[in-house]
DNA sequence: AGAGATCGGTTGGCGGCGCCAACGATGTAG
DNA sequence: CTACATCGTTGGCGCCGCCAACCGATCTCT
């Protein structure tokens, strides 16, 4: 394997994005096995955790654009993982509900994702994994809301 | 700002990809200011560091698909940042050369990228930055060549 | 020397993700 | 009542990663 330029490997942003690419590849494989993708997981997780929500709210929680929420919910509704009904209290909104099948799918995706963590972090000790998570969390929360 | 599901924030792969998204956004802004994108930087950096190379070699070094190398080099050649000439020793290959203008462009992108690191890692102390880089490097090298 | 595998460049296409502009319907504040 | 904001939806764009196919050149094996 040819060497990677030090110009690149010296930049944290490069390391970050490259490792993220790998994480994304692993996650996509796991999700693909159950016929889903990342956007579906985010929405199912948000619904499971906070209950019924409007699409706009889901977008804000999951860091997704409104238009992408529409597409994802179309796909989830097609598979009966989610139900979309008009909100009687505010006729602009849709009420999005998690179904039993959706909850089962979420469980499946969660298990797949747990395997991904193990694969991804394999070379790190438990303390190192914790340290990494701590550092990333600091960066994540700091840059929330840009 | 609505809360993000703990399902997500608990997974290192999620934190990683989200922070990477932010890093990517910052880098894109910086690159955009000089009319370039990530693929251009990778190739210029590889040429600067290892000298003349074939497109296939650049692809291997920079973790890029051969077809994407073609497109990036088309764009770089258009801007005279790179020169593409047939290799007399192996008529399948192209010899890709960094021009003076290309080297200047690389300098500009390097400066932009340095500012990105500062912005991205702002909440971390010098030791924390070092620790993060060390951990990411371990993950990066471990997953090299999948 | 010749047949077959491999390599390099090119074209064309696809999917995931992030994002933006615009529209119409609805809601809210003045 | 008017102005403004919000919500869902449609349609489009860019970046990045990747794949299949093709053709010419090169290498390998016999």
Image (cartoon, coloured by chain):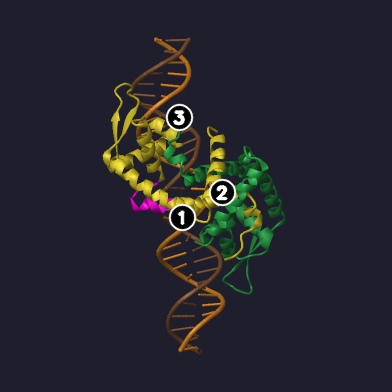
Chain colours: A yellow, B green, C brown, D orange
On what subunit does the disc labeled 2 rest?
A
* Magenta region: A25-37
Residue A88 visible within the image = yes
- Give the residue pinned by disc 2: A16
Do circles 1 and 2 both sit on a common chain? Answer: yes
Query: Do the numbered discs 2 and 3 sit on residues whose CB atoms are within 8 Å?
Result: no
**Numbered badge on residue A119:** 1
User: In this view of the protein, which residue sits in the foreground, A26 or C19?
Assistant: A26
- Residue occupied by mark 3: B2
Which percent across, then down, holds residue A132? Answer: 55, 46
How would you rate the neighbour count of disc 3 (Cα within 10 Å): few for under 14, some for 14-19, many for 20 or more? Answer: few
Task: Work out whether disc 2 and disc 3 sit on a shared chain.
Answer: no
Identify the mark nearer the N-term, 1 or 2. 2
Q: Residue at x 38, y 50 (%)?
A: A112
C2 and A133: which one is in front? A133
Query: Against D4, is A83 above or below?
Result: below
Q: Quadrant of the C terminus of chain A?
A: top right
Q: Is residue B69 left or right of residue A118?
A: right
């Amino acid at each position: 394997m040819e060497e990677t330029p030090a110009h690149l490997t010296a930049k944290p942003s490069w390391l970050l994005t490259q490792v993220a690419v790998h994480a994304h590849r692993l996650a996509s494989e796991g999700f693909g096995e159950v016929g889903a993708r990342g956007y579906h997981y985010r929405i199912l997780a948000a619904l499971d955790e906070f209950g019924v929500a409007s699409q706009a709210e889901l977008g804000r929680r999951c860091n997704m654009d409104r238009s992408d929420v529409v597409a994802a919910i179309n796909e989830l509704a097609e598979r009966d993982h989610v139900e979309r009904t008009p909100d009687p209290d505010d006729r602009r909104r849709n009420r999005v509900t998690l179904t039993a099948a959706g909850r089962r799918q979420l469980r499946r995706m969660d298990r797949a994702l747990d395997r991904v963590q193990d694969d991804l972090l394999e070379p790190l000790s438990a303390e190192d994994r914790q340290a990494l998570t701590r550092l990333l969390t600091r960066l994540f929360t700091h840059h929330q809301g840009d």
